[in-house]
Each structure stands twice: as C-alpha cells, then as structure tokens.
Amino acid sequence: MKIAIIAATSFEIDTLLQHLDAEGRKASFFHYEYKGHEIHPLVTGIGAMKTAFAMARFNEATNLDLAINAGVAGSYTRDLKLGTVVNVISDRFADLGVEEADGSFTDVYDLELEAKNKYPYTDGALVNDGLKYSFDIKEVKGLTVNKVHGTPESIDRILAKYQADIETMEGAGFHYACKNMDIQHIQLRGLSNYVEPRNRAGWQIELAIDKLNQTIINLLDNIEKPQERNKVLDWL
C-alpha cells in the first residue's frame, strides 16, 4: 500500500520516523519501504491553509491508498483522558464567519454565503463517511481554528454552537483536500491538553505524541487491503 503520513510539524511524528529509519528501508529522500508498504511522510507547516496547499501540491497524492493526518489536539471534554488517541470522523472550519456585536459567532452558512450541503460539506461539516478501512480507535467530532480558544466565554459559545469533542489547527484543511482529491483518509490525534483558559502547566504533549506514534506504528503493522476489512487494534 502507498500511505502518506501528514503532520504539521516534524516533532509530532519524530518517533515514527525513527522507527522507519530503524525497521524499514529509506528508498529515497521522500519515502520509506516498510512491511510491504510505501510510506511518504509530509510535513506541511501549521494551519489548515498550509495543510490543504501541501496536500494539493503533493506529487504522490493521486496514487495514495491512504493518507493519515497525525498530530496533537485539545479536548473540549474531560471524559477523554490526555494521551488518548482519537479518530476525527467529522471536522469543520469553526472560525470562518463574523463576530457579532454581542460576541456571538455567525458562520458563513448562517450568513448564507456558502451552501452547507454542497460537496464536500454535509451540514457545513467535512464528514469522513467513505472510508474503506476499519479502525478500532475512538471516534470524535473536531473543530479546526486559526486561534485556539482560551476564555470560558469563547469556549462555551463554540461548544454551544457546534458540540464538538476536540480542537485542532489543521484537521478540516486535511479533510477538505482529501475529499476533493478523492483520497482515502483518516485524521488521528493524540490529546495533549484540555481546551480551557490557557494553562501550559497542564499540557501533556510528550504523552500525546508518544501514544499517537505508537498507534500509527501499530496501524502500519496491521493494516491490509480494503477488501480484507482488517481492524487495526487500538493501543490505548
């Protein structure tokens, strides 16, 4: 299988790259051979715009069997423990619109500037509903933002509007690119912090990245062709 690993920063997949260096073969500067797969790491830079652009310019994109977006995320819910790896099956751009005089947010669909059910959107969301592979990883709904939420008021407003589980800065850009290019894809996120008034002391980035990389390595070790419908075990 030809698989791309898409990350905003190299440190989010550093453990995976070390594993591929040790256990696989670097076939070229751009890809590895590992367990019968051709693995293409791609570091895009931070943000949905850079992610979507990098995917569109990626030479191997149209030949991929699977694209995996790997990164950390903040959780809106305390029901998910930090370090948990989740599969984002629905994502949306959560700050594309206008801020009203009372501080509330009106998105482009409420403004009727965009059709909320025009492809690739479903009710304004990018839903990963055509995946041919099966993964036993906790499924969640995500929001993609340019500015992470850091006040109780903004957090309460965004949750009331979208009722999501996690927040990232790239996910919807990844889904948008993959859906428009007809690429099988999955967004995996390790939860590094809770979305709350900014408190870096409570973050567990190393734990989240470690669990994320372990999960991806396990996925690569076990994934088979779509017709096999092989379930990849969740390491958590």
Image (cartoon, rainbow, N blue to C red):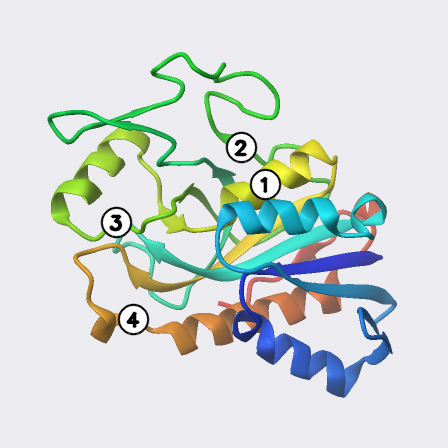
Query: Mark 4 touching mark 2, by CB under 8 A?
Result: no
Q: Estimate how packed mark 4 is, as few (under 14), some (14 to 19) or many (20 or more) residues with alpha carbons within 10 Å.
A: some
Measured as percent of width and height from the top left, residue 199 is found at: 19, 67
Q: Earlier in the sequence, mark 4 or mark 2?
A: 2
- The answer to whether 162 appears left or right of 131 in the picture is left
Q: Residues within 10 Å of mark 2 (few under 14, many from 20)?
A: many
Instruction: Check disc 4 and give the amino acid type.
Output: Trp
Q: Disc 4 designates what residue? A: 203
User: Which residue lies under the disc numbered 1?
Assistant: 175
Q: Is residue 138 visible?
A: yes
Marks 3 & 4, CB-CB < 8 Å contact: no
Q: Residue at x 62, y 66 (%)?
A: 216
Q: Nearer the viewer, residue 134 or 37?
A: 37
Which label number is shown at residue 126?
2
- 3D distance between C-alphas at marks 3 and 4: 15 Å
Residue annotated with mark 3:
149
Q: Helix, strand, or loop for circle 2?
A: strand
Q: In terms of secondary structure, where does tag 1 sit?
A: helix
- Circles 1 and 2: CB distance less than 8 Å? yes
